[in-house]
Image (cartoon, helix red, strand yellow):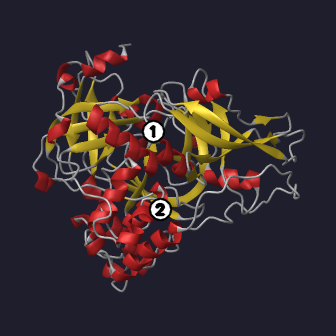
Amino acid sequence: MLSLRCLYSDIFSKPTCFGRLGLLTPFRIGRTLSAGSQEAYKGLSSPEVAQLLQEGGVDFRDCFERSQLLERLSASFPQLPQSLRSKIEGLAESRRSVLPQEPQDTPSTNNKISNEQTQGITYEKDTSSLFKDNDVSPGTSSTQNNPVNLQRAADGLYGDEQYIVDLFQRCKPSVVHIACMSPGQHRSSMPSLNPEFVPRNFGSGFLWDQQGHVVTNYHVIHNAHAAQVTLSNNQKYRATLVGQEPDKDLAVLKIDAPAGDLTPVQVGVSHKLIVGQKVFAIGNPFGLDHTLTAGIVSGLGREMRSITGDNLRDVIQTDASINPGNSGGPLLDSRGRLIGVNTAATSHPMTTAGFGFAIPADTVRRIVNQLIRYGRVVRPGLGVMCMNDVHSRQLLGSGSTGVVVHDVVPNSGAAQAGLKGVRMDGYGNIYLGDVITSVGASSVNTVEDLVSFVEAFQVGDQVPVIVRRYNSTTHMDRSFKVEQLAVPLLHEAKSY
């Protein structure tokens, strides 16, 4: 077994010049909004800005910091539909007079835990609709400009069947086949096309941009010294390794292909996913054709073990089959937008029980952009692992605020500051520890809020954090006290 260092030998040792990729365009914040709304406009959180960009059909795949999302929204503002511009102005105006309120020391008068997981969370109503035409807005990519005609029933197909066929035909050019070579490996015969016996060095991926970046799973290229990418037009290119994040099972390759042959996937958001919405998994396991499986989101905030032995947290669970060879392919919503990266470990018992897993698109966007720019993950963190937003609302009750700390990374800034995670008894009852309610002057309601607000600080800063510290004498106890902490910001690769 070779060490991970051998990944950089041969073709993977060629560096990528990040400064010449042309991924970012410099925009100035607020240059298109009214003067009275500019400061409040900056108060929008990352999830809100990403959602607005998605609604406007604006590409934001290369934005992983909140400031970059704001720049993209400001620059695209004049091209957005009037209704969306009015919505943005309204949101900005509503923030002008709203200041974050510190929670008060108070025992809860209601010790009942709500079973309503989705109350208090706003979802995009048409994300899971299978029977609506795609919205085509200014700024959309070429892969978005083919709205599905649901009235057409070619070859005797029903409307919903034709919708899926059209979605597959529209999205499959973004999906590639990846074949890797390990030292001493030789192949002299055609592999079986039986999906149960896909060679371990075969996998899928998808095109991230027209600069030739390809996203896939880390375990697809693990221990490889060479890789070849096959596009949907059957053109083959040798690939170089740009960067990898084993703890997230993500890797980025790069091919030198004409931009006209590259059809990047349309990037969506994952924080709005709800259990029950339709999803589609596309792969290219053999380099000869593409596969499609369909299903629903069957769970959120799940965990699975990565190839490094660490847990992949907050993954999407789906009953859309993710077979060997389809690892690294995109998980799409019913409009063909990326909501996750499929990951399948054949040794995982859930893969034989009708379940598959995918890394959420919000995580993918942050990790991939750092790998492209720096070759590694460099974003600092507090050192806390938080519960999924749905699970936080389930534990805290409807109308609650804050993010529940699940665990604290040893020797991290959070550990030094004394932050506490949850604990569980033998019956599976959860006893709350700390709930983060604000960072700096900004209120925290979601994990994405926490990530975006921490990004405003630099390594070495003392980050002011307000938490509700629960007494948890019993698992139903919701009395708490408010504590203000200063958390040192360290380099930390672990996710929130």
Q: Is residue 266 visible?
A: no
Of the two numbered discs 2 and 1 on the same chain, state the one appearing first in sequence: 2
Amino acid type, callout 1: Phe
Q: Tell me what residue is drawn at x 26 percent, y 32 percent.
A: 242
From the viewer's perspective, tell me whether residue 13 is left or right of residue 170.
left
Hey, what amino acid is under mark 2? Glu
Measure the C-alpha gap from mark 2 to mark 1: 20 Å
CB contact under 8 Å: marks 2 and 1: no
Give the crowd class for mark 2: few <14, some 14-19, many >=20 residues within 10 Å. Answer: some
Q: Nearer the viewer, residue 408 or 262?
A: 408
| x and y, in percent, of residue 384 in the image | 59, 34
Please tell me the numbered disc located at residue 195: none
Q: Residue 22 placed where, x, y %? A: 17, 47
Label 2 sits on residue: 48
Residue drawn 29% across the image and 33% down it:
374
Residue 429 vs 245, above or below: the answer is: below
- State the residue in front, 218 or 399: 399
Specify the quadrant of the image occupied by residue 75: bottom left
Task: Name the foreground residue: 191 vs 272.
Answer: 272
- Tell me which residue sits at (79%, 35%) in the image: 424
Q: Position of residue 443 (x, y in %)?
A: 59, 53
Residue hosting label 1 = 457
